[in-house]
Amino acid sequence: MLARVTSAAVLGVDAYPVEIEVDISGGLPSFTVVGLPDTAVQESRERVRAAIKNAGFPFPASRIVVNLAPADIRKEGPAFDLPIALALLAAQGVVAQDRLSGVIISGELALEGSIRPLRGAITIGLFAAQDGYQRIIVPPENAAEAAVIGGVEVYAPRNLLEAVAFLQGRSELAPAEPRALEAASVAPDLQDVKGQAAAKRALEIAAAGLHNLLMSGPPGSGKTMLARRLPGLLPKLTRDEAIEVTRIHSAAGALQESGLIQAPPFRSPHHTVSDAGLIGGGNIPKPGEVSLAHRGVLFLDEFPEFSRRALEVLRQPLEDGVVTISRAKAALTFPARFMLVTGMNPCPCGYFGDTQKACSCGPSMIQRYKERISGPLLDRIDLRITVPRLPAEDLIRVPVSEPTAVVRERVLAARRRAIARQGVANAQLAGQALRQHARLSAASEGFMKLVVKQLALSGRGFDRLLRVARTIADLSGEEEISEAHLAEAVSYREVM
């Protein structure tokens, strides 16, 4: 007796089909899984056996062979439990084989037969729609996530018994409806931050042009508060961007609810994060924090405290918007187009240059501390500002400042202006497009020559300064970059 069921597995942020073949033959009772299964797949034998028996179906006392094809790709995770169980029941005639054709099935089984959630459901839904499958069966917790793609019916039985009844035609299941995920909580308002008008202006420029930002200042000056308010200035994700972001979070198992992420993500890993946790990795690579921050903000507080190796690996995604991880078993590329926002102290004790508290660090200590951030990495950060300690007047009398909603309107207007002109945010302008859309007047060219000489700008530094000036001009509603725009851009390139 032979039966086949189609499932799907996630590799990176893409899915591929897995054909599950079950053969029941005479001989001593055994249950063998072949096709490069990992430990979790091997253990599915016990989960499937218990789930079938507890659901009230017969389990054959025969020789059972389960093959997972293609056999040259390693299969991992418990998501093959449900398709293996249904294939076993189909081989016994409990479920008709023709009812399983054109269906992708995926899900983990509990011992009593309930179906548990899986990773990468949206990726499986996208694969099913692109390959012409009519239906997919996934756990209830993943139904709304898999349904956001459209073009395929998504069914979500609660347990094995319900899945069998549906496939036998004895009961009906309503197709799942897609659902958008709103932000878990309202983004904190920029108005809550006392003072720091210069830092707020830098935040506005960074949001308008998707520029990287470094904030340096003593402890308690407001660097983290400012960073956490940046996502509130960014526009909502487009549908394509939302699908892209949701796929990454789902593949990494970081999706808290089933649905489509619409708000730009904000990731803030601790400085003790491992290299693999930050960049991604594993025997079969999985997304790291840089990919989970795709289309959003990656905030690295205590920037110099991160390992030098992890920081240097940031250079590729900052330039290319992708991170490539190569392992012996697989080499995968993950999207990683994020805004890098960093916070750091001016010295190990944090009070160098502070007018109210003395610094206890010697010059060599301060120099070594700053040298933890390499020149090439620092050159990739467009805006570098100092966030000073607030004076007593600003702490006691809270000056009225602009709320996030007002600043966001200016950011969105500048972003719309840039997209209409060149199709991408200013931080992504490069090559001929940068020369075309960030042209300088004769007076501005003379000013720029002086800046390049005084700051000893590299080619990359020159381009990044030009992009920031282009964003400042967009915020002013002006098409031409003036000397005032360039001068303000230069003021955000403090030597750290």
Image (cartoon, rainbow, N blue to C red):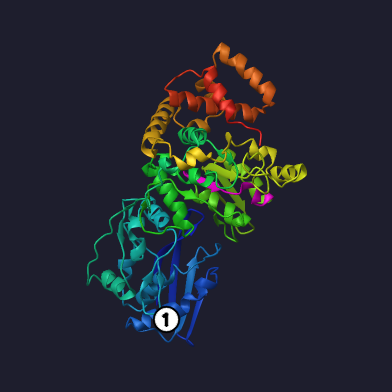
Question: Whole-percent x and y of residue 36?
Answer: 55, 68
Residue at which label 1 appears: 49
The span picked out in magenta is: 295-308
Q: In this view, does 448 lie above or below 387?
A: above
Q: How many marks?
A: 1
Question: Whole-percent x and y of residue 336?
Answer: 53, 45
Picture residue at 33% right of the left edge, 60% below the top: 143
> Is residue 164 toward the left or the right of residue 201 in the image?
left
Question: Whole-percent x and y of residue 89?
Answer: 36, 76
Q: Quadrant of residue 415?
A: top left
Name the quarter where the N terminus is drawn.
bottom left
Name the quarter where the C terminus is drawn.
top right
- Residue 299 highlighted magenta (yes or no): yes
Amino acid type indicated by mark 1: Arg
Which residue is more in the foreground, 219 or 453? 219
Q: Is residue 363 above or below residue 157?
A: above
Picture residue at 38% right of the left edge, 55% below the top: 125
Picture residue at 44% right of the left edge, 23% below the top: 476
- Residue 161 highlighted magenta (yes or no): no
Q: In this view, does 96 lie above or below 282?
A: below
Which residue is more in the foreground, 125 or 135? 125
